[in-house]
Image (spheres, helix red, strand yellow):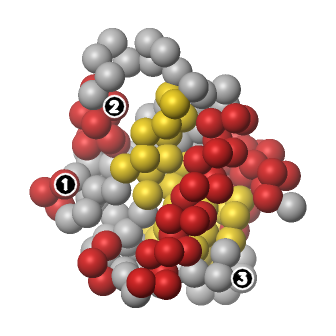
Amino acid sequence: MSASTFRFGQHVVKASVVFLQTESSFALVNRKPVVPGHVLVCPRRSVERFRDLHPEEVADLFKATQRVANVVEQHFQGSSLTIAIQDGPEAGQTVKHVHVHVLPRRPGDFEKNDSIYDELQKHDKEEEDIPAKWRSDEEMAAEATDLKKYFN
């Protein structure tokens, strides 16, 4: 991939939606967030399963996730976080590239707290993942620009 795009499983992601890059990871805004501020942190190397990451990639991925989590909780005025990896199809993984979901949470954002996992489960299902439900490139780039400011 060129410097203007990133590989995310079967998808090509524009650099304009990426707000953090580390040696082994990158973070991007979500085209269809479950809650405001729902972002993804991914290893640069396209690896389908968590077990296939090298130890140094795991360390970098989780350091990046911690940094991103602190920022999105603050920026989106959350009071808690849901951090999740869906590792394999039975776990709900639809993009064949390890990624960490970081979701800032607020009191009462879901009637039942664990309903967020139901939402994540159907979030990227093919019948739900249609362009008409995606945010615009401009909206995602604006959010990424806002978040980049925390990492400079």
- Earlier along the polypeptide chain: callout 2 or callout 3? 3
Earlier-in-chain disc, 1 versus 2: 1
Q: Residue at x 57, y 55 (%)?
A: 66
The residue carrying pointer 2 sits among few (fewer than 14), some (14 to 19) or many (20 or more) residues within 10 Å by Cα, namely some
71 relative to 89, above or below: above
Q: In the image, 37: left or right of 71? A: left
Quadrant for the N terminus, please: bottom right
Q: Is residue 18 visible?
A: yes
Give me the C-alpha separation between circle 2 and circle 3: 34 Å
Residue 12, visible in the rendered structure: no
Tell me the amino acid under the disc marked 3: Ala
Location of mark 3 (residue): 3
Residue 116 disc label: 2
The 10 Å Cα crowd at callout 3, few under 14, some 14 to 19, many 20 or more, is: few
Specify the quadrant of the image occupied by residue 90: bottom left
- Does the CB distance between marks 1 and 2 fall below 8 Å? no
Mark 2 secondary-structure assignment: helix
Nearest to viewer (mark 1 / mark 3): 1
The span from disc 1 to disc 2 (Cα, nearest Å) is 14 Å
Q: Which residue is mark 1?
A: 91
**120 left or right, relative to 77:** left
| Residue 53: percent from left, percent from top | 37, 82
At x 65% / y 82%, what residue is drawn?
23
Residue 52: percent from the left, percent from the top?
A: 30, 83
Give the foreground label among 2 and 3. Answer: 2
